[in-house]
Image (cartoon, helix red, strand yellow):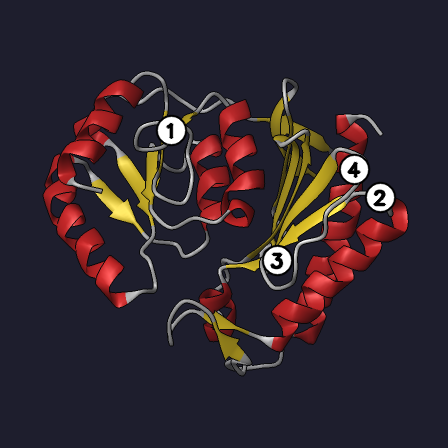
Amino acid sequence: MTDAELLELARRVGQEAAAYVRSARPDGRVDVASTKSSATDVVTEIDEACERLIRERIFAARPGDGFVGEEGDDVAGSTGVDWVVDPIDGTVNFVYGIPAYAVSIAARRGGEVVAGYVVNIAAGTEWGAVAGEGSWRYEPDGRRMLTAPAVETLAHALVATGFNYVPEVRAKQAAAMAAFIPQVRDIRRIGSAAIDLCALAEGQFDAYVEQGLKPWDLAAGGLVASEAGIVLSGLDGPPGERLVMAAHPSVATEYFELVRACGF
């Protein structure tokens, strides 16, 4: 498969997974099946069933590929392609019924993300990207290509962020944010990194910062953002679990310096 064909597979599977989650979600709050990094970092049975569905569909189409998912064991592949999947990115939103939670599916070839698909399950909004070919939002009449707008000044930047579920880590992040927030327009904490990064690509945010992202949080949304012209970085290298910061090139250097100076 070409990278574009990998994306089409991700979209077909992602649409089915999103439809499953919508149909399986009961009214009211969703029961928590287990927790991960802390008592507030939750997993539901629907998360786990959704990941099983995605895994089954991908392996049916490409049985030799690898798989890295949030809720299950990794599978090593033999084709050089592996899939990085978050079945419900924004599980706490899902539990409470806040309509910002997503299926996120990315394909990596030789360790590099080459295709990414994100769908906001509740709203039905879809984004896609192919490395070197741009990113877009899917519309009823086709694709709308994304080009992130320039930022006027860092002081006027609206910044998306999130916080770790481990209390000790969260306390340090709060201290860094206290130094950070007076120097930008404001922050938004939506609760889904994948949706945040796609919204950044669309221009709904000017910049982004978060610590603690796993590969499945970052892979698809990060490609959508970078293919729209956003610069992504880590603290002293590539973006990763230690730190992800992202901004338009017009303010990226200044913004990254600010994030570091505030102690993230």
Disc 2 or disc 3, which is closer to the eye?
2
Which residue position is annotated with label 1?
233
**What element does badge 1 sit on?**
strand
Q: Are marks 4 and 1 in contact (CB under 8 Å)?
A: no
Does 105 sit left or right of 193 as displayed? right
Q: Earlier in the sequence, mark 3 or mark 4?
A: 4
Q: Is 101 drawn above or below residue 36 in the view shown?
A: above
Q: Earlier in the sequence, mark 1 or mark 2?
A: 2
Q: Is residue 140 at least partly visible in the picture?
A: no
**What element does badge 4 sit on?**
helix
Check the picture and name the quadrant holding the N terminus: top right
Residue 231 location, quadrant: top left
Disc 1 or disc 3, which is closer to the eye?
1
Does 80 sit left or right of 245 as displayed? right
| 168 vs 78, nearest the viewer | 78
- Disc 1 from disc 3: Cα separation: 28 Å
Q: On residue 64, which mark appears?
A: 2
Within 10 angstroms of label 4, few (less than 14), some, or many (20 or more) residues? Answer: some
Does 162 sit left or right of 105 as displayed? left
Q: On residue 8, which mark appears?
A: 4
Question: Residue at left 52%, top 78%?
Answer: 34
Question: Residue at left 22%, top 21%?
Answer: 254
Within 10 angstroms of label 3, few (less than 14), some, or many (20 or more) residues? Answer: many
- Disc 4 from disc 1: Cα separation: 28 Å
Within 10 angstroms of label 1, few (less than 14), some, or many (20 or more) residues? Answer: some
Which residue position is annotated with label 3?
121
